[in-house]
Image (cartoon, helix red, strand yellow):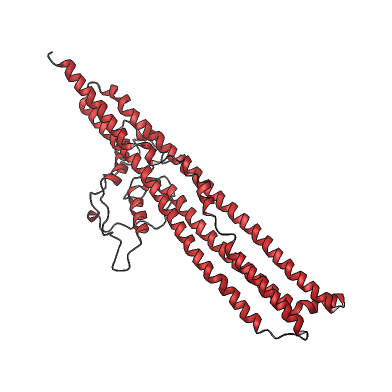
């Protein structure tokens, strides 16, 4: 996986601290370890914590032949293969248990700390979508309330204002009606512009996240392909060293399976975060179903008790028009300009990602074993009788 160059990452192997031993085989061996944070933290520097891998893996270290590099990558692999799932997580107490997605996210954090930076971007993307959704809902309700207030003011004071300017009561009444219609159109136009900006931001965030995931999954696919090919190419280096070749083949096989696991759990983490986004949008719809009529009914109750001015007949007519327009505005603010989930689906462009299923891990490993077995039988057949 490509990582940003840092002085620590470029340190010579002779001066780099040795990789730690593989993690313990069970969580009970480390009961006091810290719980992973709810939000994946980006590494502040090239070094990791004292109880983990000391530095990120560079591309050249995946297939390096020195023992230090192989031990460091193997320690990363052990974080996944040598730890059982926490059936009763060590951070859980007698309080209400965490939701399953919290448990799953923390287990991924412990097993694949190397992809913490990308998971942090995915997590932040989901939180940005949620915050933008809440702002969008708040702006819609605010604009609804402002439009209703404008209708009430024009119905109550509008005829007097315009009559003062025109010196004609009928003209003032007609201008009040026109002003109420203009307020409706102005509200519609402002809300449409704000929704376009909201959708544009949502699509941009989705596109940026997709670009990062495409880059990371392609890097992992290249590493996976190289690991598969290396198992055959490196065999010539160990023609007279069966144990050395067996040890190297063991490492390359584990590396191939681990890269596949990284792809799988990265895909699951994205699925988990998008599941949370969909659930939040589902509940936001119910929030809108509650707030939209609530704003309208509060406004209607206050407007109904408003004392009529001198010309009560004209006021009642404007009041009825304001109620009709207010009802239309409230209905439109609920049924239109909803968060477009298809925008996330289209701009994320998952069809361009390298998916775990496309790696075909089982057949890749099994095919390598098949070729080795065939060569072994052929060698025995050729040497039989010598």
Q: Quadrant of residue 6?
A: top left
Q: Quadrant of residue 380?
A: top left
Q: Quadrant of the N terminus?
A: top left
Q: Quadrant of residue 155?
A: bottom right
Q: Is residue 177 shown left or right of residue 32?
A: right
The image position of residue 279, as x and y in percent, is 44, 60
**Is 270 in front, or is 256?**
270
Q: Quadrant of the C terminus?
A: top left
Q: Residue furthest left?
A: 385
Q: Residue furthest right?
A: 167
Q: Is residue 115 shown left or right of residue 289?
A: left
Please, is residue 245 above or below residue 91 in the view? above
The image position of residue 293, as x and y in percent, is 57, 72
Q: Residue at x 32, y 40 (%)?
A: 258
Q: Residue at x 34, y 63 (%)?
A: 98
Residue 4 shows in this picture: no
Q: Residue at x 32, y 65 (%)?
A: 97
The image position of residue 8, as x and y in percent, is 41, 41
**Is 317 in front, or is 370?**
317
The image position of residue 91, as x and y in percent, is 30, 61
Q: Is residue 90 shown left or right of residue 292?
A: left
Number of marks in the rendered image: 0
């Amino acid at each position: 996986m490509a990582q940003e160059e840092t002085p620590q990452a470029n340190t010579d192997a002779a001066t780099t601290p040795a990789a730690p031993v593989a993690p313990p085989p069970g969580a009970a061996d480390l009961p006091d370890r810290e719980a992973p944070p709810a939000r994946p933290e980006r590494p502040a520097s090239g070094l990791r914590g004292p109880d983990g891998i000391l530095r990120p893996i560079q591309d050249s270290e995946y297939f390096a032949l020195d023992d230090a590099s192989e031990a460091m990558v193997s320690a990363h692999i052990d974080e996944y293969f040598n730890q059982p799932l926490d059936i009763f997580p060590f951070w859980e107490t007698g309080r209400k248990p965490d939701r399953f997605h919290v448990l799953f996210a923390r287990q991924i954090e412990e097993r694949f700390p190397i992809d913490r930076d990308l998971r942090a971007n995915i997590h932040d993307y989901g939180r940005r979508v949620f915050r933008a959704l809440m702002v969008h809902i708040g702006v819609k309700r605010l604009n609804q309330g402002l439009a209703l207030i404008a209708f009430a003011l024009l119905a109550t004071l509008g005829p007097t204002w315009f009559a003062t300017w025109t010196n004609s009561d009928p003209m003032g009444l007609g201008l009040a009606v026109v002003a109420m219609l203009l307020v409706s159109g102005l509200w519609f136009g402002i809300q449409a512009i704000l929704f376009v900006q909201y959708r544009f931001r949502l699509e941009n965030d989705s596109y940026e996240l997709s670009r990062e995931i495409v880059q990371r999954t392609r890097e992992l696919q290249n590493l996976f392909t190289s690991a598969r090919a290396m198992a055959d190419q490196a065999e010539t280096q160990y023609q007279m060293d069966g144990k050395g070749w067996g040890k190297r083949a063991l490492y390359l096989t584990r590396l191939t399976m681990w890269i596949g696991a990284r792809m799988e759990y990265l895909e699951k983490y994205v699925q988990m975060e998008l599941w949370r986004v969909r659930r939040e949008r589902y509940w936001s719809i119910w929030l809108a179903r509650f707030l939209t009529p609530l704003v309208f009914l509060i406004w209607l109750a206050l407007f109904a008790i408003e004392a009529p001015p001198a010309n009560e007949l004209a006021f009642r007519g404007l009041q009825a028009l304001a109620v009709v327009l207010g009802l239309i505005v409230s209905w439109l603010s609920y049924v239109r300009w909803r968060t477009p989930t298809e925008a996330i689906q289209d701009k994320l462009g998952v069809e361009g990602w390298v998916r775990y299923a496309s790696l075909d891990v089982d057949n890749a490993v099994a095919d390598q074993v098949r070729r080795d077995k065939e060569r072994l039988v052929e060698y025995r057949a050729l040497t039989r009788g010598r």
